[in-house]
């Protein structure tokens, strides 16, 4: 079996001391591809370097809403230069966030639209983040559609009633280890209604760890907080396989075809 982590941040310095061991453990467990999402201009070179160095890693470049306020005046030109130099790279992480303190939604929408326009012009897939701004995101995607390559709603935890609309809009949805927390049981239930051909799995590592005790290869940062890592992708596969009454191998094959269609 071969699996793709559809959304992670392997460039995060917290993972650096563990990265080689985690990737070796991933390969032993059949996880062979990683879509590494940049979040701000300063981490794009790190993402590019990892994508060159790690067999199976694919770069994605974008401005995450949490880091948009610190962007430079020529961020969009820099983003386009990173993308045109790397034809296999995707766009993201970008999106909308009304959960963060002091959010500036009009500014987030302007930045999001710039990413979506670029995705159309360069024909790249897009990875979208959204917290507490689902109607606004749906309107933005309707008014400024992403490239026909498609888009991923990463760690989708939006309202269940918006799911059919997102499916009609062509969205893909990725399931993350954080959805194994009992408080996310409603999200896990919602994932049972997503068409199989739209499902992907991701870790969002090093953030969004699974519940304590569930993590494979438990890791912690220097302050002893749990670190999510890409081996936890296996937890997503096993949970979804149980929920969809499929064998892990059979579901893994479907998920890999879905990742192939979107990113490769
Ligand atoms: Zn992320």
Image: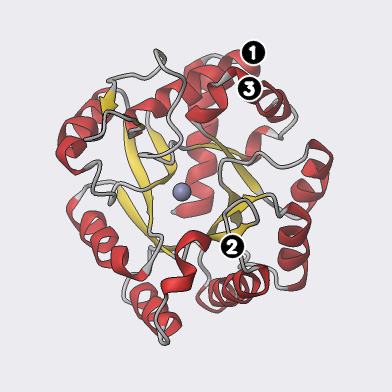
Distance from disc 3 to disc 2, alpha carbons, whole Å, reads 26 Å
Label 1 within 8 A of ligand 1 by Cβ: no
Compare marks 1 and 2 and give the one earlier in the sequence: 2
Of circles 3 and 2, the one toward us is 2
Q: Name the residue under label 3.
A: 183
Distance from disc 1 to disc 2, alpha carbons, whole Å, reads 43 Å
* Residue drawn 67% across the image and 29% down it: 187
Give the colour scheme shown. secondary structure
Q: Mark 1 points at which residue?
A: 245
Q: Is disc 3 in contact with disc 2, using a CB cutoff of under 8 Å?
A: no
Of circles 1 and 2, the one toward us is 2
Q: Is disc 1 in contact with disc 2, using a CB cutoff of under 8 Å?
A: no
Between 81 and 131, the one lying in front of the other is 131
In the rendered image, the vertical position of residue 179 relative to residue 92, given as above or below: above
The image position of residue 144, as x and y in percent, is 71, 73
Kindly indicate the quadrant of the structure image that contains residue 198. Answer: top right
Distance from disc 1 to disc 3, alpha carbons, whole Å, reads 22 Å
In the rendered image, the vertical position of residue 52 relative to residue 28, given as above or below: below
Which SS class for mark 1?
loop
The image position of residue 132, as x and y in percent, is 69, 49
Compare marks 1 and 3 and give the one earlier in the sequence: 3
Kindly indicate the quadrant of the structure image that contains residue 147. Answer: bottom right
Residue 125 visible in image? no
Label 3 within 8 A of ligand 1 by Cβ: no
Q: Mark 2 points at which residue?
A: 102
Q: Is residue 37 left or right of residue 178?
A: left
For the C terminus, the image quarter is bottom left
Between 23 and 218, the one lying in front of the other is 218
| Disc 2 packing (10 Å; few <14; some 14–19; many ≥20) | few
In the rendered image, the vertical position of residue 15 relative to residue 37, given as above or below: above
Between 141 and 40, the one lying in front of the other is 40
């Amino acid at each position: 079996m071969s699996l793709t982590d559809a959304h992670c941040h392997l460039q995060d310095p917290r993972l650096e001391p563990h990265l080689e061991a985690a990737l070796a453990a991933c390969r032993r467990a059949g996880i062979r591809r990683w879509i590494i999402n940049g979040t701000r201009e300063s981490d794009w070179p790190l993402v590019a370097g990892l994508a060159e160095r790690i067999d199976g890693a694919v770069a994605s470049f974008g401005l995450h809403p949490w880091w948009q306020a610190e962007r430079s005046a020529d961020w969009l030109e820099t983003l386009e230069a990173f993308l045109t130099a790397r034809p296999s790279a995707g766009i993201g992480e970008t999106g909308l966030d009304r959960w963060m303190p002091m959010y500036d939604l009009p500014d987030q929408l302007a930045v999001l639209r710039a990413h979506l326009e670029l995705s159309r012009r360069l024909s790249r897939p897009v990875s979208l983040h959204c917290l507490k701004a689902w109607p606004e995101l749906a309107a933005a995607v309707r008014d400024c559609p992403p490239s026909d390559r498609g888009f991923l709603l990463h760690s989708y935890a939006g309202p269940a009633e918006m799911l059919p609309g997102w499916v009609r809009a062509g969205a893909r949805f990725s399931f993350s280890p954080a959805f194994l927390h009992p408080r996310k049981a409603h999200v896990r239930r919602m994932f049972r209604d997503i068409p199989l051909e739209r499902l992907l799995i991701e870790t969002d590592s090093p953030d969004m760890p699974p519940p304590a005790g569930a993590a494979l290869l438990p890791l912690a940062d220097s302050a002893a907080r749990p670190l999510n890592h890409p081996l936890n992708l296996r937890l997503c596969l096993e949970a979804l396989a149980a929920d969809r009454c499929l064998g892990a191998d059979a579901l893994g094959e479907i998920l890999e075809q879905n990742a192939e269609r979107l990113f490769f």
